[in-house]
Amino acid sequence: MERTFWYKDAVFYQIWPRSFKDGDGDGVGDLMGVYEKLDYIQSLNVDAIWFSPLYPSPNADYGYDVMDYMDISAEYGGMEAFRKVLQGAHERGMRVIMDLVVNHTSDEHPWFQASRRREEPYTDYYIWRKAKKDGTLPNNWDSMFEGKAWQYDELRKEYYLHLFAVKQPDLNMDNPLVREEVKKIMRFWLDMGVDGFREDVITFISKDKGLPNGSPLMPAAKGISHYANGPHVHEYLMEFRDVLDQYDCVTIGEAPLVTARRALEYTEGKRPELDMMIPFQCMEGDCFLTDYFPHRFSLRKLKWIWGHWQKTLRGRGWNFLYLENHDHPRIVSRYGSEEYRVESGKALAASYLFQQGTPIIYQGQEIGMTNIRLESIEDYEDVQTINHYHTFFTNRPEKDRMARIWRASRDSARTPMQWNDGPHAGFTTGEPWFHVNRNHAEINVAAEEGDPDSLLNFYREAVRLRRSLPVVRYGTFRQFELWSGKLFVYERRSKAQRLLVICSYTPEAVKFRAPKGYDLRKGKLILRSHGDDVENNGFVTRPYETRVYLFQDRRVPEV
Ligand code: NOJ
């Protein structure tokens, strides 16, 4: 099938279904709730929705532990509700992509249960090993979520590998039957009309032969060099490409710790293995590798990362642009300022929405939801959060340990969506499954709908503008004020248009002067957070001020 590469003009919206909107009053978000909100999603001017997993799951990792790949969880309304949402989205001109979680399943998946009993053809569907002769574990690999990566199974009398939670056994992708299953799953959803997949930890699916020990120096992820970008990953992805090629669909690869160069290995060429990679590095503006090793936010570092990805992928791959998802705390609380929540939210939005690539907005990001700070670890739900609390920095006072959780927990992104200032933020008429952030009285969709200067309306306008400007798709990317730790200034340039984006990352007043070749009075200020005053071809910034100027050369027709 001829591909249209529709995703290059698209803006995505991510839904983490459990916390988006409850339609049946049981306290858990569901597809009936999503259906109610389709007009709202459309009002954001987005083109596509990515659903975090909707499959039946015991929820050890909230849907990333799948029990049945060809069904929709009854909690979310089952297949009937899904078909309705799919149709409703398509009718509104929005595409829908699913999360494809095939590095591992749930231990409650029938394949795993049969594999434990050595029932054919499932015996080798997972990675089973005996203990070493001295009785120790098959190797020294760590699980990302729970202790060591091996769990003993009493029934089979062997260990199975789990790179994530104990309840998430890794599939054996070297087994051709497993790869056939993946293809079957892909066809199933694509035939139903789904428009593509976000592929979970897809760079981990091929493990080094013999599963050798990892370097003991790698804290908390021993073994990673033996399964990240493993020996057959490219070959397996090309096998999957044969299926994908029969549909005009998109694939987004999730690849923890991926570098821009590495992303090219997956996304370059006429027939790439994957269309885009999630650029984890843009989450490292205030931490080393993971949110749990924080440092002070550094705009310079973030600017370097953004610039590096723009430059490396230009003309070769295609960027995926994000600031938030269900795996990271809220961006305003990290890179912005809770005190200047709306202003810093706007600066962040303009910082990434006009870069080259396909942006995604995570539910709640568009209204500037912030981190939650729960009193005790007992109040948290996420397996990673709980594990990190019990594993790292255990010798520190409780206060410090909780401060780290407040800063890094994924649960901050998983609190129910704040629709209004009523009970439970309008998320449910029942008892919500997880804590609603108390600040919903001020931060909610209804309040922002009515305010023309709200962050929500800024997002709508920014997305609308981005779609109307060909320079955003095709233009080159260049930064100014490169060494500034306070301003992020970039240009997008094509033959006929230039876009100058100026974002302040500080409440301080900073003197900005337009770069050489720019006369601000000749530009059109198409998006702004504050004023439009210009003096000496520049201005003094207000807290987290944002401006986007468009310069149009009327003599050159835009392509
Ligand atoms: C990445 C997903 O985004 C995350 O939520 C999940 O816990 C892990 N992969 C394991 O599936």
Image: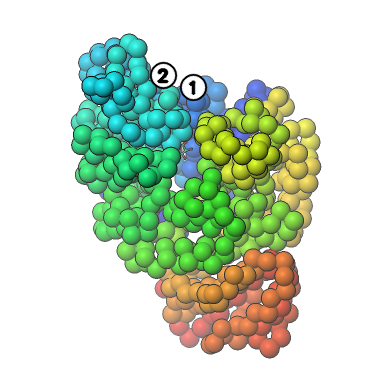
Look at the numbered discs 2 and 1 and tell me whether their residues touch, using CB distance below 8 Å.
yes
- Judge the density around disc 2: few (<14), some (14-19), many (≥20) Cα neighbours within 10 Å: some
Label ID, residue 58: 1
Q: Quadrant of residue 541?
A: bottom right
Numbered disc 1: secondary structure: loop
Quadrant position of residue 18: top right
Sooner in the amino-acid sequence: mark 2 or mark 1: 1
Relative height, residue 134 to residue 89 (above, below): above
- Residue in the foreground of this view, choosing between 208 and 317: 208
Report which quarter residue 156 is drawn in: top left
* Residue highlighted by disc 2: 108
Image coordinates for residue 24, horizontal then vertical, percent: 64, 24
Please indicate, yes or no, whether residue 157 appears anywhere in the rendered image.
yes
The structure residue drawn at horizontal position 59% and vertical position 30%, both measured from the top left corner, is 381
Q: Position of residue 36 (x, y in %)?
A: 63, 36
Q: Is mark 1 within 8 Å of ligand 1?
A: no
